[in-house]
Each structure stands twice: as C-alpha cells, then as structure tokens.
Image (cartoon, grey):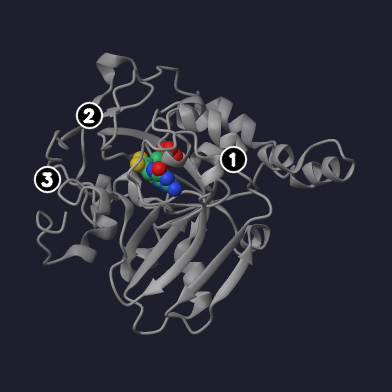
C-alpha cells in the first residue's frame, strides 16, 4: 500500500480441487487436538494450528473460479503489525498469541458482550464460502474462507437506533513489532463499516480457511472478510467491535486520505492516484495469465449494489 511494495510474486501451482476436497474429509479433529493437548503432547498454539473445522455449505459462496493455492494464500500477506514485506507475516506472526483470546463488543448496544474465541466459534454453524479477495494494490486471490455472517453476532448485542457505524480494532502489542520506527501507522489497526454494510449477510466473521483454523498470518483467530471491498477493510486478529454514532477513524484513511477512502469499495471506475484499478493480477498464475479485468464491487454488485444507491462513488471512494 503506502509503504514499499515491489516484491516478486511467488508463483506456485493452483491446488487441484480434488486435493482440496480430499483434505476436507479429515474434518472434525478438534477433539483429537484437545486430547493431544491434555496429554501434554502439543503446545496450545500447535494444537490450534492443526485444528480442522467442521463446515456446512453456503448459498453465499462464489463459484466457477479456481482457488488460489493454500501456499499463496498463506505466504503472500499484508499484516503490517508483523512487517511490510509480503513474506514477513508468515515468519513473524508465529508469535501471535491466539489463545486465550477475547472479543469485546461495546458502544451503542443494549447488550455489551464479551466472548471467548472458542465460544464464538460454536455460536453458529460454520459455513465455507469461497470469495474473491481483491487488494487495493491490484492483486487478487480466490479463497475458501470459513465463518458465519457478522450479522448473527450483531443481532445478539441488540444495537441501539443510534448505532450507525461499526469499528473493528485489531490486536496490537508493541513487543511483537518487527520493524519499530519504520511506521507512521497509529496502532491498533482500525477499520470500520456502515451499519448496513456490517449487517449484510456477505460480511463474514472469519475463523478459518481451506478447512482449517486461520493461520496466524491471515488474521488468527478471528478476522473480517468483506468481499466487495478492498482487502484492507477486512481487519485481522480482531479484539474489539464498537458500535458508534459516527464514522470511526480507520488506519489507511488516516494515513493517506487522498489514496484510501472510508468506503473503499472495489471500483474499476475510480483509480488509485498512483495506479489503475481497472485490472488486477491473480496471484499464483503464470505471469501471462495473471491479468484480468476488475469487476465493479468485485463481482458482488447484484448482492450489495443497492447499499450504495444514489451515492456518488467517486466522491465516496
Ligand atoms: N489487518 C491488520 N490488523 N493489519 C493489517 O496490516 N492488512 C489489510 C487487511 N487486514 C491488515 C489487516 C490488508 S492491506 C489486506 S490486503 C488484507 O488484510 C490481507 O489479507 P490476507 O493477508 O489474508 O490476504
């Protein structure tokens, strides 16, 4: 994004669908991981990193496109808490302490709630949803995420009529920073959505990908996925959700308001001041096959277009 980014894309093969389907037959080993834990065989982090998640099919899944390989999804990341290079999160986020983990929900709600991550995981059936993932840097992937609609959680808190926006705050601990002094980011990472965007069923509270719990570098143990927006709207490793009567400050908008708007809907008609948003590179494909046309609202216009009816999306970029 704003910071240096010109690394070579690691090119690896797309995971054959059969391989992926076979891997998913191994679901339901959470109990086994728990046993190993109590037997003292695995550390807490190792136990959860090997946990498969039981999922149900979702009507909200995107079909027809090849998945980006597990390797590319988990080794080409943006997670600035753990470095600016695409490969750094996979190395340094190993230190992210994902258990115990608490999510605090407060602000303009009737019922402020606090959840332990393992309670949250069991709150609703976990769905597998394949979504297109489009970064503002003009690269994209196709990822089988696991989670349930954020709206399911929001309903439990009974938001007040004054709740117009939702803010998401990421975990942050200075002692885990691997590049102190090189950032003007005001931590913790903050993102926000308008209430109707947060309530849209496509907005996914995400616990896993490719049949397993989220790898740390992808935002373990809990992140957001908002498939019609640029990737930076999807905060990783969330510890707090706040309901507000005003638009919250958000990390990239704070840093460069002319480059990153609050809405940040994927929009091929509004270029970034320094590059085009009309096309994107699909990560993992051979170089000559990478380039493709970016779709308005990342291809989700039929589902979410009405949220922006009458709005000037060039002004509200
Ligand atoms: N969340 C936090 N806490 N810190 C970050 O640096 N990067 C964002 C978003 N969420 C980021 C974050 C950006 S710029 C993108 S493109 C996506 O995460 C990347 O998600 P991925 O690495 O799983 O592809």
Picture residue at 13% right of the left edge, 57% below the top:
313
Residue annotated with mark 3: 270
The quadrant of the rendering that contains the N terminus is top left
> Is 275 on the left-hand or right-hand side of 37?
left
> Is 247 on the left-hand or right-hand side of 222?
left
Residue 46 placement: quadrant = top right
Q: CA distance from mark 1 to mark 3?
A: 35 Å
Q: Is residue 222 visible?
A: yes
Say above or below: 9 vs 263.
above
Q: Which mark is residue 292?
A: 2
Camera-near label (2 vs 3) is 3
Residue annotated with mark 1: 211
Camera-near label (1 vs 3) is 3
In the picture as drawn, the residue positioned furthest to the front comes out as: 181
Between 289 and 75, the one lying in front of the other is: 75
Q: Secondary structure at mark 1?
A: loop
Ranked by sequence position, the earlier of labels 2 and 3 is 3
Q: Secondary structure at mark 3?
A: loop
Residue 28 placement: quadrant = top right
- The 10 Å Cα crowd at callout 3, few under 14, some 14 to 19, many 20 or more, is some
Between 85 and 174, the one lying in front of the other is: 174
């Amino acid at each position: 994004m704003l910071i240096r980014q010109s690394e070579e894309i690691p090119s690896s093969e797309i995971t054959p669908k059969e391989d992926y389907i076979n891997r998913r037959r191994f679901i339901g080993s959470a109990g086994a991981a728990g046993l190993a834990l109590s037997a003292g065989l695995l550390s807490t982090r190792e136990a959860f990193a090997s946990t498969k998640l039981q999922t149900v099919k979702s009507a909200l899944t995107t079909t027809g496109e090849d998945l980006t390989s597990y390797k590319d999804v988990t080794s080409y990341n943006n997670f600035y808490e753990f470095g600016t290079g695409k490969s750094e999160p996979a190395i340094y986020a190993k230190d992210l302490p994902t258990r115990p983990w608490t999510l605090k929900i407060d602000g303009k709600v009737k019922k402020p709630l606090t959840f332990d991550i393992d309670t949250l995981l069991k709150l609703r059936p976990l769905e597998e949803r394949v979504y297109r993932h489009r970064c503002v840097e003009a690269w994209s992937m196709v990822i089988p995420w696991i989670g349930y609609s954020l709206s399911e959680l929001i309903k439990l808190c009974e938001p007040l009529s004054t709740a117009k926006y939702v803010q998401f705050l990421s975990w942050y601990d200075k002692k885990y920073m691997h590049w102190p002094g090189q950032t003007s980011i005001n931590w913790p990472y903050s993102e926000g959505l308008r209430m109707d965007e947060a309530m849209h069923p496509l907005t996914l509270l995400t616990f896993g990908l490719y049949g397993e719990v989220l790898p740390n570098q992808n935002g373990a143990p809990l992140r957001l996925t908002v498939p019609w927006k640029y990737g930076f709207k999807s905060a990783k490793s969330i510890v707090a959700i706040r309901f507000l009567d005003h638009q919250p400050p958000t990390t990239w908008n704070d840093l460069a308001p002319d480059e990153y708007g609050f809405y940040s809907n994927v929009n091929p008609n509004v270029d970034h001041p320094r590059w085009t948003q009309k096309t994107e590179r699909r990560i993992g494909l051979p170089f000559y096959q990478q380039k493709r046309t970016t779709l308005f609202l990342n291809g989700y216009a039929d589902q979410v277009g009405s949220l922006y009816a009458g709005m000037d999306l060039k002004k509200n970029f």
